[in-house]
Amino acid sequence: MRILLVEDETRMAQALCEILRLEKYEVDHCANGPDGLAAIESNIYDIVILDVMLPGINGYKIAKRVRSQGIATPILMLTARSELDDKVTGLDCGADDYLTKPFMTRELLARLRALGRRTLGTTDCTLSFGDIALDTSTLMLSCITNGQSIRLSEKEYRILEYLIANGSRVLTREQLAVKIWGFESEAEYNNVEVYMSFTRKKLAFVEAKTEIKAVRGIGYELRYDDV
Ligand code: CA
């Protein structure tokens, strides 16, 4: 699960990054509004933790802007103020949840878990697309029509999970590289291609009709033609 933290207070941001990494989340941090907005627009995050008072553009405006672009990433708003008005403004802008500073770590983690479940779009642990199903806890890929299954490696799993979450939308190599390997990694786009071919072999192994199609010059998409 990849989280973007947009928070300008250095100590707060450092503490949150540390806590989240301990909880095995992957975390990227932006310290101002414009950087935060650009990072959310990359559309590679599972959850955004968004401070309201930020240099450049405030959290409300950021939320409104990304929602108007059709980006549905769950947003947890943070604010130092506790007025009801703020809460209403935040939710009006498209935030999914709201936390008032100071807050307890365990409350933050509980909210993140709830938003994470929403990201998966399901409370049980199966993702599906076309004729394939993906078990999110065992990393088993199966073909619904013939019952064949195979275990995926972590990277293969994350590739398919990301593709499924985006339905038939085309994902660029850049989005995939950043989502699976992270901004800080040295992942070359070659990596994406190598793992795509591994993942395709697994799809072929279970004889699924769902395919990962390369879209020339752009990236990849999932396709299912039931013919
Ligand atoms: Ca702030």
Image (spheres, rainbow, N blue to C red):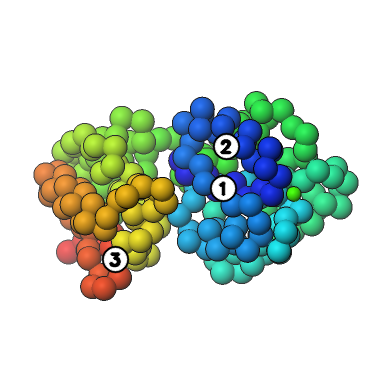
Q: Which residue is label 1 attached to? A: 29
Residues at marks 1 and 2, CA–CA distance in whole angstroms: 8 Å
Q: Secondary structure at mark 3?
A: strand
- Residue 89 point in image, percent of width and height: 79, 57
Q: Which residue is label 3 attached to? A: 219
Is the residue 168 above or below the residue 25 in the image? below
Asked if residue 193 lies left or right of residue 36, the reply is: left
Q: Residue at x 22, y 65 (%)?
A: 214
Q: Residue at x 49, y 51 (%)?
A: 45
Q: How many discs mark residues in the rendered view? A: 3
Is the residue 198 above or below the residue 105 in the image? below
- Residue 221 point in image, percent of width and height: 29, 62
Classify 10 Å Cα crowding around label 2: few (below 14), some (14-19), many (20 and above).
many
Residue 118 in view here: no
Q: Which residue is label 2 attached to? A: 17
Asked if residue 151 lies left or right of residue 29, the reply is: left
- Residue 31 point in image, percent of width and height: 63, 52
Residues at marks 3 and 1, CA–CA distance in whole angstroms: 26 Å
Residue flagged by tag 3: what amino acid is it?
Answer: Gly
